[in-house]
Image (cartoon, rainbow, N blue to C red):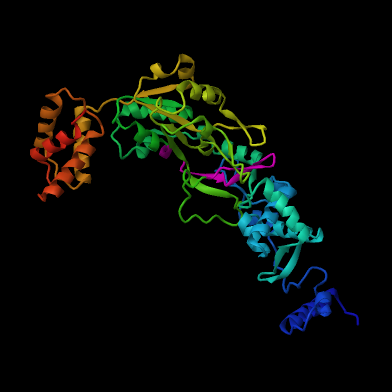
Amino acid sequence: MTFASEGIQEDFRRRLVALLNEHPGEGDDPWLAIAQQGGGPPKAAPREEPSAESISQQEPPPSPDGPFVPRAPQTIEESGLSLSEIEALVMKYLLNCGATAGRDIADRLRFPFRLIERLLRQLKEALLVVYKSSAPLDDYVYELTETGHERARRYSQRCTYFGTAPVSLADYIASVRAQSVTRQAPTLSDLRRAFEDLVLGDEILSQIGQAVNSGQGLFLYGAPGNGKTSIAERIIRAFGENIWVPRAVSVFGEIVRVYDPSSHEILPDDSPPRWVDQRWIHIRRPTLVVGGELTLDSLEITTSRTTGISEAPLQMKANCGTLVIDDFGRQRVSVAELLNRWIVPLEKRYDFLTLGNGRKIQVPFDQLIVFSTNLDPRALVDEAFLRRIPYKIDVRDPTEKEFRDLMRSMAAANGIEHRDDVVDYLLQTHYQGTARPLRFCHPRDLLRQVKIYCAFRQVPLAMTREAIDVAVHNYFAMM
């Protein structure tokens, strides 16, 4: 029998497969095997994947001067990964999850299905995978052959990672350059918005604004309780709010995880369009705060001997954001060791890291680094290091007016009626009378004690001399 066209022949084969699937016989069915030759169960209506040209028509690429947005790769070469790297991820996924549809594999790797489909076809031709059955949306369910199992196990022995496909180091570097803090230019109004919930004078706002615009490091120093950490944590609000980070980066065959749920905040209800590369995550500009727990190991790439998966260091996770070293001088690592480790990155804005295989790589050191300390910076570091931190800001004690303003705002926040006469009593009796310095944190802490005192005594919530005396006694007992 001959057919008028290849299309009629394909239609006949589809119908034959459907009929034989609906009425299976005993044992192996040679007709079903013949019908399935040439690529498995036929596809009723091939769904066209959009071409690079059609996607470009749907959504024009961002301009060079616009915000950075990663575009989905149209070819393996555009992904920045080698075919063997993607093959390893696919086969390790099948090894761990068993028979899986091609689209599920693509979703897991967050890689375009049309590229995964071509790779799976090649793996089938190499007898590494087989079709187990058909799947919805013109897809197949794949499983490893015995040879495929053996190769997947070898891949897994080297590195167990089979999650989202990484991006190349070159693409990561380009993304940091495009979203660099040095490309931002916050204005005074941006600074006022960032610190709207703090009481800061124009002088300190001006100093912070200059440091932020430089994109270089700064020292926040001064007495405890004046809001150094609060200032450091809010600085990032003056920059553009959001950036894109990759879930992982591939470097010389090593996979380094960059996205960290404990450090990065994904934008809520963020559903990027189809043309965006799903290997990247849209997050708020990060602010990482580390204190006494900081060690030199946390500044290096760490590789698990069990899994072979590497984790990016703190400064790499903080790229395009802020890294706050709180209580500087009280870390487990000595000040001299920390400064020696960072003296070159602070000046050159790049860092050298060592992979688990011993190879060194160069990565951007692109964050606003903030050293916050209660100690005199000159007693901690030498002149050479201070020169590399161009901005030093003394976070001084509040003036009496600022203290009164804080008492008023904190009273409102706690639902307490503000009374000027009680504030006068507090200042005259417990500050001026004892030569006690004012601190920015005192209004908040004292009024919290007043609120607790009133609740415990079951008396009306009010700012009274008695309540203030009790709060002062509790709070300043050993201070």
Quadrant assignment, res 220 = top left
Q: Relative to 468, is 284 on the left or the right?
A: right
Look at the picture and state if 24 lies above or below 474: below
Front in this rendered view, residue 299 or 51: 299
What span is in magenta?
236-259
Quadrant assignment, res 117 = bottom right
Image spot of residue 183 (x, y percent):
52, 34
Image spot of residue 464 (x, y percent):
9, 40
Image spot of residue 298 (x, y percent):
51, 34
The image shows a total of numbered marks equal to: 0
Front in this rendered view, residue 241 or 91: 91
Front in this rendered view, residue 477 or 374: 477
Residue pictured at 49% horizontal, 15% vertical:
384
Look at the picture and state if 307 lies above or below 396: below
Image spot of residue 176 (x, y percent):
57, 37
Q: Is residue 381 magenta?
A: no
Q: Is residue 244 magenta?
A: yes
Q: Residue furthest top?
A: 383
Query: Is residue 90 something that shows in the picture?
Result: yes
Q: Quadrant of the N terminus?
A: bottom right
Q: Relative to 59, is 15 on the left or the right?
A: right
Q: Residue furthest front?
A: 306
Q: Relative to 137, is 30 on the left or the right?
A: right
Q: Quadrant of the C terminus?
A: top left
Front in this rendered view, residue 391 or 251: 251
Q: Relative to 443, is 140 on the left or the right?
A: right
Residue pictured at 69% horizontal, 39% vertical:
252
